[in-house]
Image: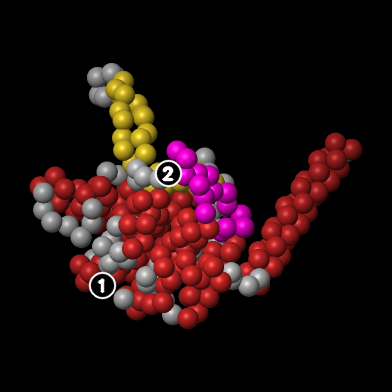
């Protein structure tokens, strides 16, 4: 009986601690959002995010508040001699936070730090072929998202993606879409949706569009989507998210069902921004 009482007490204590921790985090975030958005940061947004002013006024305000929380909670690390500046932090945070607008968000809860290289970086990896042989592979990347709480970005590619918001290529949006996909523990092309019944429609629409891209890539047919999205469903979700934010009219015209799924998930209609 005593053991049951102790277990129950410890359990209730843990629940109370978690509730208190969430309350403190929410209160702190409200305080961060209530503080003035630095003038220097506004200058960076005007300089580096050309479509910021195309956003509705309420989304502009929401984005600035999200940026404040993001920069308060996430650590930036410069690699290969790159010195982290507010320009780097704000430019990356602004693009990452686009994916959080209008949604109940915990601000990428699994993400601890963003590593930034001056340019594309090299990643060594291993893969095993069907015969069981292990091959060393060296890849030059512009970005990478890890389930262990890190996003790695090339600053050069980050700037290029931000400068042209209509080409459907944005490394920050791509990698942070992976972060959303990884919130349930693994990347599979299906992030956490609002309702359980949403997964059936999501799976049907995304599977069809993914298979169409795989066929297009195999036959060399033109596609709205980068062939890299045919690698697997996780990459497909990241690629179509780039197109959703940067080429929404074309996406809605060619793949209306896919646009509806993404619009429902992100709670946004970016056609109106363009």
**Residue identified by numbered label 1:** 249
Q: Report the quarter where the N terminus lies.
A: top right
Give the camera-side residue of 18 and 85: 85
**Where does the magenta region start and end?**
70-85
**Left or right: where 7 falls relative to 220:** right
Above or below 17: residue 27: below
Above or below 122: residue 35: below
Residue 6 in view of the camera: yes
| Residue at mark 2 to residue at mark 1: CA–CA distance | 33 Å
Q: Does the magenta stretch include residue 272?
A: no
Tell me which residue sits at (16%, 48%) in the image. Answer: 217
Element at label 1: helix
Residue 201 in view of the camera: no
Above or below 120: residue 216: below
Give the camera-side residue of 205 and 150: 150
Element at label 2: strand
Looking at the picture, how far across and down is residue 160, in whole percent? 32, 57
Q: Nearer the viewer, mark 2 or mark 1?
A: 2
Which numbered disc flags the more N-terminal residue, 2 or 1? 2
Q: Which mark is residue 117?
A: 2
Above or below 25: residue 49: below
**Left or right: where 4 falls relative to 27:** right
Tell me which residue sits at (35%, 35%) in the image. Answer: 122
At label 1, counting other C-alpha atoms closer than 10 Å, the crowd grade (few under 14, some 14-19, many 20 or more) is: some
């Amino acid at each position: 009986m005593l053991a049951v009482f102790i277990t129950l007490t410890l359990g209730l204590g843990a629940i109370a601690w978690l509730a208190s921790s969430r309350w403190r985090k929410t209160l702190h975030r409200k305080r961060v959002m209530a503080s003035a958005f630095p003038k220097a940061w506004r200058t960076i947004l005007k300089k580096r995010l050309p479509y910021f002013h195309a956003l509705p006024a309420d989304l502009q305000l929401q984005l600035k508040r999200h940026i404040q929380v993001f920069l308060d909670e996430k650590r930036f690390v410069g690699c290969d001699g790159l010195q982290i500046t507010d320009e780097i932090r704000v430019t990356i945070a602004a693009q990452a936070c686009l994916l959080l607008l209008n949604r109940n968000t915990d601000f990428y809860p699994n993400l601890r730090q963003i590593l930034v290289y001056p340019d594309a970086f090299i990643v060594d990896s291993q893969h095993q072929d069907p015969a069981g042989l292990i091959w060393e592979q060296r890849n030059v990347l512009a970005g990478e998202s890890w389930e262990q709480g890190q996003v790695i970005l090339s600053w050069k590619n980050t700037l290029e993606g931000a400068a042209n918001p209509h080409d459907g290529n944005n490394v920050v949006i791509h990698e942070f879409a992976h972060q959303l996909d990884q919130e349930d523990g693994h990347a599979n092309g299906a992030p956490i949706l609002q309702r359980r019944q949403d997964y059936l429609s999501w799976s049907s629409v995304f599977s069809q569009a993914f298979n169409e891209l795989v066929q297009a890539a195999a036959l060399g047919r033109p596609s709205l989507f980068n062939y890299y999205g045919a690698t697997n469903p996780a990459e497909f979700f990241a690629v179509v998210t780039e197109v959703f934010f940067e080429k929404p009219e074309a996406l809605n015209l060619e793949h209306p069902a896919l646009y509806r799924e993404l619009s429902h998930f992100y709670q946004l209609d970016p056609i109106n921004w363009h």
